[in-house]
Image (cartoon, rainbow, N blue to C red):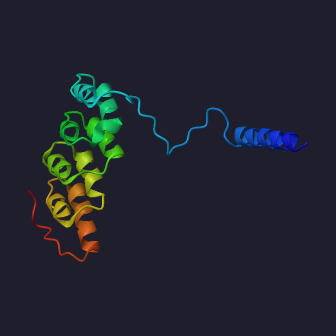
Amino acid sequence: MNNQHQSNTAVSAEYLQLRLFKLGDIDPYVFVDELEGWSLTNVKALALDPEVRIRELAALSNMNLDAGLQRTLCTDPAESVVLTLLSRVDPTVEMVHLIAAGPHIEARRNVARRNLMTPLLELLAEDNDTTTRELAQARLVTRGIRVDTSRVR
């Protein structure tokens, strides 16, 4: 009798789980790395591929924590690759400097919205893009830091 009760409980738990999580439901907090199992060397090679979608895959890879790969991806000619990388990692100091010096306006705006160290925000507060500059300046003002609005690089 006890075994039968445990069996019914297990079936009920499975049934409950199936009802709560229908097949095909996607958990937005679970990321599946399409390049799982690939070596860092291979992912670095993909980051140099002529196809933008392949480079975006490299940016989504869990290997994107490598500093060399980050350097390659955050200086990519396609802004979508840089934004994809920023969607997966918090930018390092080096990444912010490279992105700030780069041509991608939306990537600079993305970085300026973040809670960065004050010197990095000060760098972005001098950006030639008005929105980037204003985002960084607003963050600095919330920290009680006076901003010289006349300075633009």
Tell me the residue at 25%/38% (across/down). Answer: 79
Position of the N terminus, as image quadrant, is top right
Question: Residue 70, position in %: x, y?
Answer: 22, 41
Q: Quadrant of residue 10?
A: top right
When asked about the image quadrant of residue 83, the answer is top left
Find residue 150 and report its image quarter. bottom left
Quadrant occupied by the C terminus: bottom left
- Residue extending farthest to the right is 1
Q: Is residue 151 left or right of residue 139?
A: left
Question: Residue 57: image x %, image y %?
Answer: 34, 30
Please state which of residues 47 and 150 is positioned toward the viewer in this rendering: 47
Name the one closer to the observer, 132 or 19.
19
Q: Residue at x 20, y 35 (%)?
A: 76
Which residue is located at x 19 percent, y 54 percent?
Answer: 93
Q: Is residue 107 left or right of residue 29?
A: left
The structure residue drawn at horizontal position 20% and vertical position 62%, both measured from the top left corner, is 121
- Relative to the observer, which residue lies in front, 70 or 40? 40
Q: Residue furthest bottom?
A: 144
The tally of labels here is: 0
Q: Residue 27 appears at what percent x and percent y?
A: 55, 42
Q: Residue furthest front?
A: 2
